[in-house]
């Protein structure tokens, strides 16, 4: 068993945590751009996990949510408590129901404007642009403009971008891209649709 | 553009947030078991994002980390601050380097014992069993025993299990399974290996 794939994998996982700790201690020379995309769960949730982790390190963070969810979301209720968190939910929410496209575009642009402020502020160590990919796919915000802002951001700033359907150019530019792939979902399992942890 | 796939997608995303809010308000009849697996990033991070979300709802949560990382991890530093969080890191840490398999097994069993306490406590709304899958793959903890404990847990309790290589029986039992698939990683991009947000 000493040389089993499982033990090797476990050893690698252990090594990773050691490497990670080293990175934590080292001065970070260049922040990274992380994209969480795909049709599975956990894209935004992992983004919020990174926000928690950064707060654990005493860092200042910024969040812009491009799709306005319920004001009852747990993450908003939770992260708004901390004065190191600058939290912004897109002004009006996108008007999918009313189909007021002009208003949606204005809302997306206002959210992007807020994002740009965070992407210019070297005091903000991590910026989460939640569901930005959807605004990009709708062409409410231009991908070129986003990449230009990412290029021009403070050297050590990390950025996490979430949402299905990340544009190819953004994937190309990003340092780390994860596809959250749906294997199985409670909602797809018939009678379980009323249950969930997707607050 | 009104009927474009992007707009449809966005509308679905919006609908999801509405559904999610409904779920948040509704009394949850049965907790779900969520498995985050695969070789990409974000498995544990999404687990910690769920912990943050649950805290946002004022819930009591429990965390057991089956792979002891650095004590400097951001998530541990952060979540230990809250009295609604019961946080446990596996006693000795697995001894990959020293190859003391007996000690590893004892450590994994102790961590699982702690997990069982949480899985019996109806006051704990969400239990995160971080990297449990690795202990399962190594057969340090029996998958059958885990599934039996999940079946016997309090009705409304949610459980999140992370780590590569989730066993097939666990995937079969779980309600929601996401494969975090590596598309691209900064570590794989040569010169960028010194940079990271994997504290």
Image (cartoon, coloured by chain):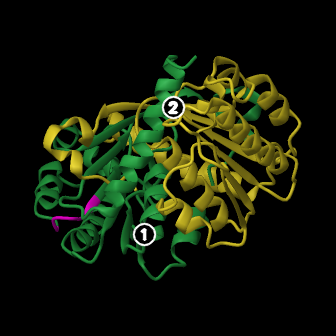
Chain colours: A green, B yellow
Stretch of the chain drawn in magenta: A154-158
The residue pinned by badge 2 equals A10
Few, some or many C-alpha atoms within 10 Å of disc 1 (few <14, some 14-19, many ≥20)? some
- In the current view of this chain or complex, which residue is farthest to the bottom? A83
* Residue B180, numbered circle: none
Point out the tag, 1 or 2, that comes first from the N-terminus: 2
- Secondary structure under tag 1 reads loop
The residue pinned by badge 1 equals A57
* Residue at (66, 27) in percent of width and height: B136
* Residue at (80, 35) in percent of width and height: B150
Q: Is any atom of residue B3 visible in this view?
A: no
Instruction: Give B124 or A30, whichever is nearer the viewer.
Output: A30
Tell me, yes or no, whether dots 1 and 2 are on the same chain.
yes
Q: Chain of mark 2?
A: A
Q: Chain of mark 1?
A: A
* Residue at (84, 35) in percent of width and height: B149
Q: Work out whether B151 lies above or below A17.
A: above
- Percent of width and height locating residue B155: 87, 44
Instruction: Give A184 or B94, whichever is nearer the viewer.
Output: B94
- Percent of width and height locating residue B193: 22, 45
The quadrant in which residue A78 appears is bottom right
Q: Quadrant of the N terminus of chain B?
A: top left
- Percent of width and height locating residue A79: 52, 71
Q: Quadrant of the C terminus of chain B?
A: bottom left
């Amino acid at each position: 068993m000493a040389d089993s794939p499982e033990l090797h994998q476990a050893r690698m996982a252990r090594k990773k945590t050691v490497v990670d700790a080293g990175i934590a201690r080292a001065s970070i020379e260049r922040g990274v751009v992380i994209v969480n995309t795909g049709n599975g769960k956990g894209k935004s949730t992992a983004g919020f996990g990174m926000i928690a982790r950064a707060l654990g390190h005493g860092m200042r963070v910024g969040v812009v949510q491009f799709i306005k969810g319920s004001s009852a979301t747990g993450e908003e209720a939770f992260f708004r408590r901390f004065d190191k968190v600058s939290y912004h939910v897109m002004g009006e929410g996108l008007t999918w129901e009313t189909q007021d496209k002009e208003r949606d575009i204005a809302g997306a642009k206002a959210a992007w404007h807020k994002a740009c402020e965070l992407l210019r502020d070297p005091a903000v160590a991590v910026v989460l642009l939640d569901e930005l990919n959807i605004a990009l796919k709708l062409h409410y915000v231009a991908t070129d403009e986003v990449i230009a802002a990412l290029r021009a951001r403070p050297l050590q700033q990390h950025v996490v971008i979430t949402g299905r359907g990340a544009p190819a150019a953004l994937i190309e530019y990003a340092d780390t891209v994860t596809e959250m792939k749906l294997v199985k979902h409670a909602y797809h399992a018939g009678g379980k649709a009323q249950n969930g942890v997707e607050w």
